[in-house]
Amino acid sequence: MKHLPMTLLVLGLAVLPAWLQAATSGDAARGKAAAAACVACHQGDGSGKNNPSGESWPQLSGLDAGYIAKQLHDYKSGARENATMKPFAMMLSDQQIADVSQYYSEMTPKQGQGGHDASDAMLQRGRILAERGDWSDYIVSCKSCHGPDNQGVGEVFPGIAGQHAGYIEAQLEAWQAGTRKNDPQDLMGTIARKMSNDDIRAVAAWLASQPPRSN
């Protein structure tokens, strides 16, 4: 019995993705060079851009390095689909992904864009959904997973406070439609499918107006 914990550990490692088993620590200095191709969309400071008339590019600065790395590996494997991101992710080795992720994680995030024209009522609804949820519709609050002030918890739950409204809205819609499925145990999909379009717009606008995670 004393050998059981090690056996379980080995079995657990066996089901981890290969890139995670072989993961190495990232180097921000190397990551800056590898991130040259990211600048066109995500900007030199990692702040991204809210684009009301098209695809919004998320703010990467200040996100957890492990979270960024997982998303890049998911783009490579097809677990997360995006025609724009896949070619760039395919260009990166596992070490470059670790380096780029570390580079962006050490940046200071800017204030999110979008939602500035939201009404007080919309922002109030967004605040309720983010902080308390709506149990009448079985909608769990954002902070239940994304942590205090929605500033993120480890590599699984990213900071979403201060993220661009257009990007948050697009991702919730993707989970709702089933076109994004790389969340653990369909947590996000389950929540998004319970939200109305107005709920999605409201919580996106409110989160974008909140202070981002500070490093």
Image (cartoon, rainbow, N blue to C red):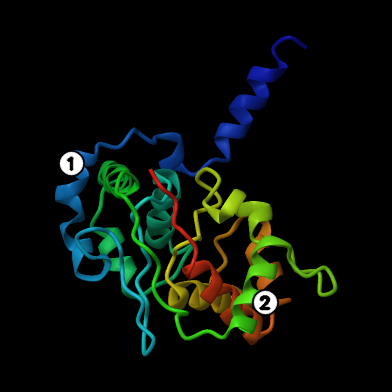
Of 21 and 32, the residue lying toward us: 32
In three-dimensional space, the C-alpha distance between marks 2 and 1, rounded to whole angstroms, equals 43 Å
* Residue that appears at 18% across and 40% down: 29
Rendered view: 24 above or below 51: above
User: Which residue in the rendered view is the most extreme toward the right?
Assistant: 136
Q: Quadrant of residue 204?
A: bottom right
Q: Is residue 58 left or right of residue 128?
A: left
Residue 49 appears left or right of 114: left
Residue 173: percent from left, percent from top: 56, 79
Badge 2: few (under 14), some or many (20 or more) residues near its Cα, within 10 Å? many
The N terminus - image quarter = top right
Would you identify the image quadrant in which residue 14 lies? top right
Residue 182, percent from left and from top: 54, 61
In this orientation, which residue lies closer to the viewer: 114 or 81? Answer: 114
Q: Measured from the top left, where is residue 196 in percent x and y? A: 68, 84
Amino acid type, callout 1: Arg
Name the disc covering residue 30, or none: 1
Quadrant of the frame with the C terminus:
top left
Could you tell me which secondary element the residue under label 2 belongs to? helix
Percent position of residue 91, x then y: 23, 58
Mark 2 or 1: the one toward you:
2
**Label 1 crowding class (10 Å Cα cut-off): few <14, some 14-19, many 20+?**
some
| Any part of residue 154 in sight | yes
Q: Residue at the top extreme?
A: 2
Residue at horizontal 14%, vertical 49%? Answer: 33
Q: Residue at x 63, y 77 (%)?
A: 176
Identify the amino acid type marked 2.
Answer: Arg
Secondary structure under badge 1? helix
* Disc 2: which residue: 125
Residue 159 is left or right of residue 73, and the answer is right
User: 183 or 20: nearer the eye?
Assistant: 183
